[in-house]
Amino acid sequence: MTKQSKAKATLDKAIVIAKNVASELGYIIDELEVVADSQNFLWKKYKIDILAGNMDLKNKLGNKEYWVIYLRPKDTNVIGGNIFVFVDKNNGKVIGYLRGQ
C-alpha cells in the first residue's frame, strides 16, 4: 500500500493521480486542460445521463465520496480525447475512468 493510498486524498492529489492515469492510457498531458473543483459541478451536470448508460461505473461509484477530474484537449477543435477520472476521497485510489469518443 502506498503512502498516498493511506492518506485522505485532496483535490490537488486527485489531479496528479488523474494525470498519471491519463498518461498511462496514452494521453499527452501537456495537450490537456484539467477541470476540477471541490464540489464536482461539471460532473453533476452530466452524471445522470452518463451513468444511465454505464451500470458498471455506476456500481463502482456506489455511495462512495469521490473527486471527479475531467481532462479535455486544450485545442477546442479536437473532437473526443477527453477523460473523466474518479478518485476516492478517502484513500486516493482510482475508482474508475470514463473515456470520451
Image (tube, helix red, strand yellow):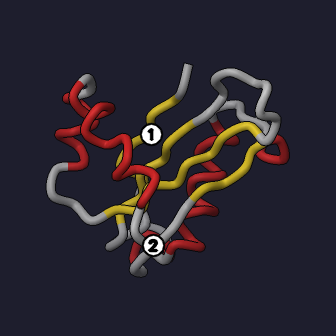
Q: Earlier in the sequence, mark 2 or mark 1?
A: 2
The tag on residue 31 is none
> Looking at the rendering, which quadrant does residue 13 occupy?
bottom right
Q: Callout 2: helix, strand or loop?
A: loop
Q: Residue at x 41, y 61 (%)?
A: 40
Q: Is residue 59 above or below residue 61?
A: above
> Looking at the rendering, which quadrant does residue 38 occupy?
bottom left
- Residue 14 place in picture, x, y as percent: 53, 65
Instruction: Please give the residue where the numbered disc 2 appears in the rendered image.
Output: 38
Left or right placement of residue 55 versus residue 31 in this view: left
- Give how far apart the Cα atoms at labels 2 and 1 are: 18 Å
Q: Residue at x 34, y 52 (%)?
A: 44
Instruction: Please give the residue where the numbered disc 1 appears in the rendered image.
Output: 97
Q: Is residue 29 above or below residue 53?
A: below
- Residue 29 place in picture, x, y as percent: 77, 45
Question: Which quarter of the rendering shows the C terminus?
Answer: top right
Q: Callout 1: helix, strand or loop?
A: strand
Q: Amino acid at mark 2?
A: Ser
Q: Amino acid at mark 1?
A: Tyr
Left or right placement of residue 46 versus residue 2 in this view: left
Q: Residue at x 57, y 53 (%)?
A: 18
